Amino acid sequence: MKSTLGEIARVIGGELIGDPSIVITGVCGIKEAKEGDITFLANSRYTNLIGETHASAIITSREVQSTPKPIIRIENPSLAFTRVISYALPSSVRHPQGIHPSAIIGKNVVLSQDVALGAYVVIDDDVVIGDKTIIYPGCFIGHQSRIGNNCLIYPNVSIREKTNIGNRVIIHSGTVIGSDGFGFINIKGIHEKIPQIGSVEIQDDVEIGANVAIDRARFDKTVIGKGTKIDNLVQIAHNVVIGENSIIVAQTGISGSTIIGKNVTLAGQSGLVGHIEVGDGAIIAAQAGVTKSVAANAIVSGYPARPHSEAKKINAYTQKLPELFQEIIDLKKRLQELEERVSKK
């Protein structure tokens, strides 16, 4: 990378305060940056680092008025920094191209323009794959599945039958979509399997992390809404519906038939029982255990999950338990001493 600060400001559409001729040779985080690097500051908690960083320039929010170093002021510094990286360091990833000779393609398969299939990909019968979709080695696509345009499916992903995937979807390695929902009925002490005959629908612009499991519905479909992003190691059970632009963080588990609204955040290791609803804009904190429906825009935490302000109070009281326990012991001792004095009179 070698660009002037003025060129970078034009690329991201920011307001430059400082010398436009300064040469930038790298990009880095604000703590690790060295001379020649450009960095960014998106969180006001790290404002003190402005005077400490060795970076030659900083991308900041518009609230920052001046600094000892040249700055580019912009509405969203984090997004702008991402664009700088894309501009300065184009991706060197080499995706598969064309159809590898070891790929196995079933009957009545439709491969649209510029589809790429890596080694040992298996495409079952009656599958349709859209323009410029790339499927890495070792993937399986089940019969009658549909995959849209410009999708990217990394190695060893399994997509079971009758799954519908929209456009610009990214699926990382090891993920399984359309596995059977966990449905059994106990008959005289024996767990009899309930057939899972539904499907999965992944809408446009969804990204799914590594080793995620999304179960097919018992009937109808499990749905992942447009623009939703799912981290690694997430379990989404049968008939779950997740609204648009939600965030599901690692190790979250969502039980069957739960409905998640739009713009919801489920933080790491949160767990939700089945047959409940989480309203639009709600935030479920890390490790929260959600046992009942959550209202729109609510923030809940703890187990069982409750309003975050209430959960914080309970946690604060819990932290005082050892101290309170000792006070009770001391009070009991004093009470015993008083009783002994009274009995001697």
Image (tube, rainbow, N blue to C red):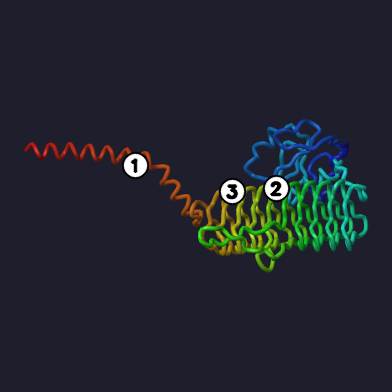
Which mark lies nearer to you, 1 or 3?
Answer: 3
Identify the amino acid type marked 2.
Asn
Find disc 2 in the rendering and name its residue. Answer: 211
Label 1: how many residues lie within 10 Å, few (<14), some (14-19) or many (20+)? few
Task: Tell me, yes or no, whether the two marked residues, 3 and 2, touch with CB atoms within 8 Å.
Answer: no
Label 3: how many residues lie within 10 Å, few (<14), some (14-19) or many (20+)? many
Residue at mark 1 to residue at mark 3: CA–CA distance? 31 Å
Secondary structure beneath dot 3 equals loop
Residue 101 x, y percent position in the rendering: 93, 48
Residue 220 x, y percent position in the rendering: 68, 68
Q: Nearer the viewer, residue 164 or 20?
A: 164
Task: Tell me, yes or no, whether the two marked residues, 1 and 3, touch with CB atoms within 8 Å.
Answer: no
Residue 78 x, y percent position in the rendering: 73, 47
Residue at mark 1 to residue at mark 2: CA–CA distance? 45 Å
Q: Which numbered marker is on residue 289?
A: none
Label located before the other in sequence (1 or 3): 3
Label located before the other in sequence (3 or 2): 2
Q: Quadrant of residue 27?
A: top right
Identify the amino acid type marked 3.
Gln
Task: Tell me, yes or no, whether the two marked residues, 1 and 2, touch with CB atoms within 8 Å.
Answer: no
Secondary structure beneath dot 1 equals helix
Which mark lies nearer to you, 1 or 2?
Answer: 2
Q: Nearer the viewer, residue 288 or 190?
A: 190
Find disc 1 in the rendering and name its residue. Answer: 324
Which mark lies nearer to you, 3 or 2?
Answer: 2
Left or right of residue 302: residue 237: right
Name the residue rendered at 71%, 37% in the picture. Answer: 30
Find disc 3 in the rendering and name its residue. Answer: 269
Label 2: how many residues lie within 10 Å, few (<14), some (14-19) or many (20+)? some
Label located before the other in sequence (1 or 2): 2
Quadrant in the picture for the N terminus: top right
